[in-house]
Amino acid sequence: MIPVTRPFLPPIEEYRDYIESIWTRNWLTNMGPLASKLEMVLKEYFNLNHLLYVTNGTVALQLAIKALELKGEIITTPFSFVATTSSIVWENCSPKFVDIDPFSLNIDPKKIEAAIGPNTSAILATHVYGNPCDVEAIDAIAKKYNLKVIYDGAHAFGVQVNGRSIFEYGDISTCSLHATKLYHSVEGGLIITKDPELLKKIAHMRNFGISGYSSFSELGINGKNSEFHAAMGLINFKWIDKIIKRRLEIIERYNQNLQNFKAKVPLWHKNSNQNGAYLVYILESEDLLLKVKSSLDTFEIFTRRYFYPSLSSSLPYLAPVEMEVTDDIAKRVLCLPLYYELTDEEIDWISRIILRSQNN
Ligand SMILES: *Cc1c(COP(=O)(O)O)cnc(C)c1O
């Protein structure tokens, strides 16, 4: 059986060493030394001044919306994981979907202005598959209309735009460190903002709004993360260069093998690097996709239709809206198996099955 993804696990001895240190200190959670160290290490890695480690990527989005005090409509992409939209609804705002660009698969900045109304307060865009949004265009629109910008960077760990971390863009950027993501701490999330006041506010919010020994500064929630999670994050961080390198090699090998595959890949942002988070193909037709997928299924090679169906047409708590590009693309995207331990032989075998099934 070949799964579509497999969480990376470091050698168990490395984790055991950290666990012993947790036993010695008897400090299990509440911004302990490992969680603080993880924040420091990641801050350095991204070359950022500020960063907060939180429970998960969904809570990161919710804290972002809450901290910016967003109301009314939030312009967002229908082509993402459900958490992008659900956090908007959870925070009592309304998602206003704007169609995606057919090449990058990110929200189409050319269509944003037409969707802005008197109740629009923000834009929440996803760097889908780690491919950066057109951040310059989005930020220019936001300035013109006085909107806040949140980037859901759940897929974008290690991505840079114009030589700077992608997380520097927007009023707030978030990331997910969930087990299935490129870099993980089992569960976990990051919140990044350059605004020190906003950062302080979110730091209080993630800890029940507690601001001092016996004082509260705002409405808060439990958005902390534990020492056990931070330990996994610290160990996996030592492996991150190796992980990214191997994943990019795997993608390169698939692309070499699949030159005659009737499919294309998203057009990557031109001033940016790939992080190897996903390998997605946009197939020529849904029929072809179903054929290829079922052939792979018979060999127990599992693929995922990320992100099908589109969020604009499938959520029971929202009225469906038509999105011409998204509805079409979502039917034709297929993510292939991609994880650190996947071997060259397995890649070649998967590729052969794909090419054979397309010609049947
Ligand atoms: C995974 C993911 C999230 C949610 O992150 P969790 O850490 O699982 O809560 C949010 N947005 C996108 C685009 C994701 O892929």
Image (tube, rainbow, N blue to C red):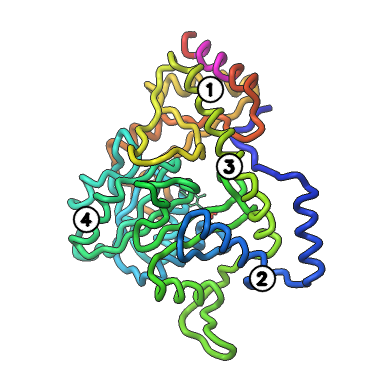
The residue labelled by disc 1 is 253
Secondary structure at badge 3 equals helix
- From this view, report whether residue 154 is shown above or below residue 343: below
Is 353 part of what is drawn in magenta? yes
Viewer-nearest of labels 1 and 4?
1
Circle 3 residues within 10 Å: few <14, some 14–19, many ≥20: few
Mark 1–mark 4 Cα distance, whole angstroms, equals 39 Å
- The amino acid sitting under disc 1 is Arg
Q: Nearer the viewer, residue 132 or 194?
A: 194
The percent coordinates of residue 185 (x first, y second) are: 63, 54
The rendered magenta stretch, by its main secondary structure, is classed as helix
- The amino acid sitting under disc 2 is Gly
Residue at 61% x, 35% y is: 339
Q: Earlier in the sequence, mark 3 or mark 2?
A: 2
Side (left or right) of 117 relative to 320: left
Q: Earlier in the sequence, mark 1 or mark 2?
A: 2
Secondary structure at badge 4 equals helix
The percent coordinates of residue 59 (x first, y second) are: 51, 62
Circle 4 residues within 10 Å: few <14, some 14–19, many ≥20: some
Secondary structure at badge 1 equals helix
Secondary structure at badge 2 equals loop
- From this view, report whether residue 29 is shown above or below residue 185: below
Mark 4–mark 2 Cα distance, whole angstroms, equals 40 Å
Mark 1–mark 3 Cα distance, whole angstroms, equals 18 Å
The residue labelled by disc 4 is 141
Viewer-nearest of labels 3 and 2?
3
Mark 1–mark 2 Cα distance, whole angstroms, equals 42 Å
Q: In the image, which residues are magenta?
A: 350-357
